[in-house]
Amino acid sequence: MSIIVKNLTHIYNEDMPFASKALDDISFEIKDRDFVGLIGHTGSGKSTLIQHLNGILKPASGEIFINGFNITNENLNLTEIRKRVGVVFQYPEYQLFEETVAKDIAFGPYNLGLEANEVDKRVKTSMESVGLHYDEFKDKSPFELSGGQKRRVAIAGVIAMEPEVLILDEPTAGLDPGGRDEIFGLIKKLHENHNMTIILSSHSMDDMAKMAKTIIVMNKGKIEFMGSPRSVFKDNVKRLKEIGLDVPQPLELAIKLRDKGFDISQDIITVEEAKQEILKVMRGRKKC
């Protein structure tokens, strides 16, 4: 499902003394089934943009088309947007409220007006897709689960609505390293198995470099860079640091090794690439 954003502007407290422009005339296009990494420091406009893509916020000006469907139309029923775009907000487990996992996941589909048998089918499918076996977890209280499992329940609740676009805002915030890796692995599987268009907001440059096909860098309400992870990170190291962002650690390592005189490629953004390049350099030195 393609997403086209045209001249989108959002102003908080518009026409008031403390008005602030959170999005400043931004335009971009996301191709069907893309995996987009959205990065930017606090206040860059990431969360504001995400809330526009799900119709939570309305722009001061501009339009958003999702598969040709104008979701900024003021007469649009929000249910139509929710069918197309699902959002998992930061710390989504705080929004869990039902007495069982199955009931919590079923809440969204029921609000779409679906029949009970269709809801049950979607609950089972979405639970299995996030690694929560239906028979084992359906009757458990979501509040008895681990942090990572709660996060999976929240994601399953969005998936059960069968959106064509899945947006995740810092989905691993607050999790330990094991839980973080589980959630990122889950997101990667969802993209591969369900052919969803995914937009992932994260501060982990290393994970963005591994997972995303397209990177959007936001700064002060504008798009600073957009392109493949390799082109965005490799070609803009200085500017990324100027606006308060890091680059993937393997690229940082490659830069430092080059500064020390090692003939190592700077076209490195993943740990595996760094490993292979360092081994190549070491083999070359042994031959000498």
Image (tube, rainbow, N blue to C red):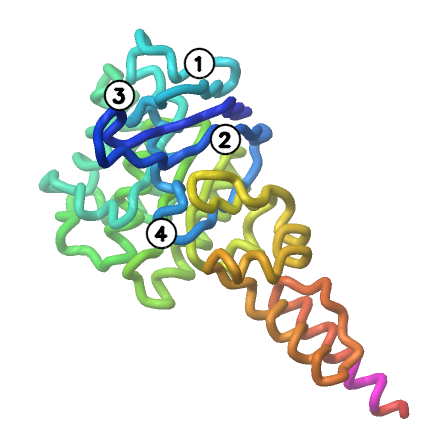
Nearest the camera: 113 or 34? Answer: 34
Q: Earlier in the sequence, mark 4 or mark 2?
A: 2
Q: Name the mark nearer the viewer: 1 or 4.
A: 4
Q: Which residue is mark 3?
A: 117
Residue ID at (24%, 27%): 108
* Amino acid type at image mark 3: Asn
Report, in whole angstroms, how far the alpha carbon at label 4 lies from the one at label 2.
Answer: 18 Å
The disc at residue 42 is 4
In reply to whether residue 284 is colored magenta, the answer given is yes
Q: CA distance from mark 1 to mark 4?
A: 28 Å
Q: Nearer the viewer, mark 2 or mark 1?
A: 2
Q: Residue 70 got which mark?
A: 1
Residue at (56, 64) in percent of width and height: 248
Residue extent of the magenta highlight: 281-285
Q: Secondary structure at mark 1?
A: strand
Q: Nearer the viewer, residue 181 or 250?
A: 250
